[in-house]
Image (cartoon, helix red, strand yellow):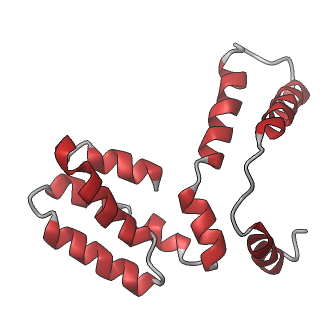
Amino acid sequence: MVHLQRNSLRYIPTKHYKDFCRDACAIYAAVSLQAAGQALEELKEKWAEYPSAVRVWIDNFEHVERLFDLPAPIRRMVYTTNMIEGLHSALRKVTRGKAAFPNDEAVFKALFLRVMDIVKKWTMPVPNWALVLGQIDLLFTDLL
């Protein structure tokens, strides 16, 4: 969702950022897929003046739809945090700095050590973690 917001804001004047973001947030924060579709229609109507910004959401709505396959607590955690993006960024720093690794095991070791450093800095609790963990347990019982 962060990338959709950023890509669509390229086509919106700065003075309208806050209003547009609030309207776009209504799409992925909707309680159901139908409500998300309705919020997208409202975004189309309200922001018709900036068709390129709206088109970003229309063209990528299939990715937003996937969120609604998840239970609400997990969905909220996914779209409200940048944890995953931050983790990916930190891992890219490890691999970008090296021209080549001698073997796959060296890559895994470097990434593992970086993850261990990152985990030490994670001090803020995830809201409603017990509820989220229960939902994850139900969804992925066969994987755990």
Image position, residue 138 (x, y; %): 81, 81
Image position, residue 60 (x, y; %): 38, 61
Image position, residue 62 (x, y; %): 43, 69
Residue 22 occupies quadrant: bottom left
Q: Nearer the viewer, residue 125 or 73?
A: 125
On-image quarter of the C terminus: bottom right
Residue drawn at 29 percent across, 73 percent down:
40
- Point out the residue furthest to the left here: 49
Relative to 58, is 91 above or below?
A: above
Count of labels shown? 0
Please say whether residue 84 is visible from this viewpoint. Answer: yes
Q: Nearer the viewer, residue 42 or 56?
A: 42
Residue drawn at 46 percent across, 67 percent down:
64
Q: Nearer the viewer, residue 80 or 88?
A: 80
Relative to 4, is 47 above or below?
A: below
Left or right: where does residue 26 sit relative to residue 70?
A: left
Residue 95 occupies quadrant: top right
Residue 133 occupies quadrant: bottom right
Relative to 128, is 116 above or below?
A: above
Residue drawn at 55 percent across, 58 percent down:
80
Relative to 136, is 113 above or below?
A: above
Left or right: where does residue 99 sit relative to residue 110?
A: left
Please say whether residue 70 is visible from this viewpoint. Answer: no
Left or right: where does residue 113 sit relative to residue 61?
A: right
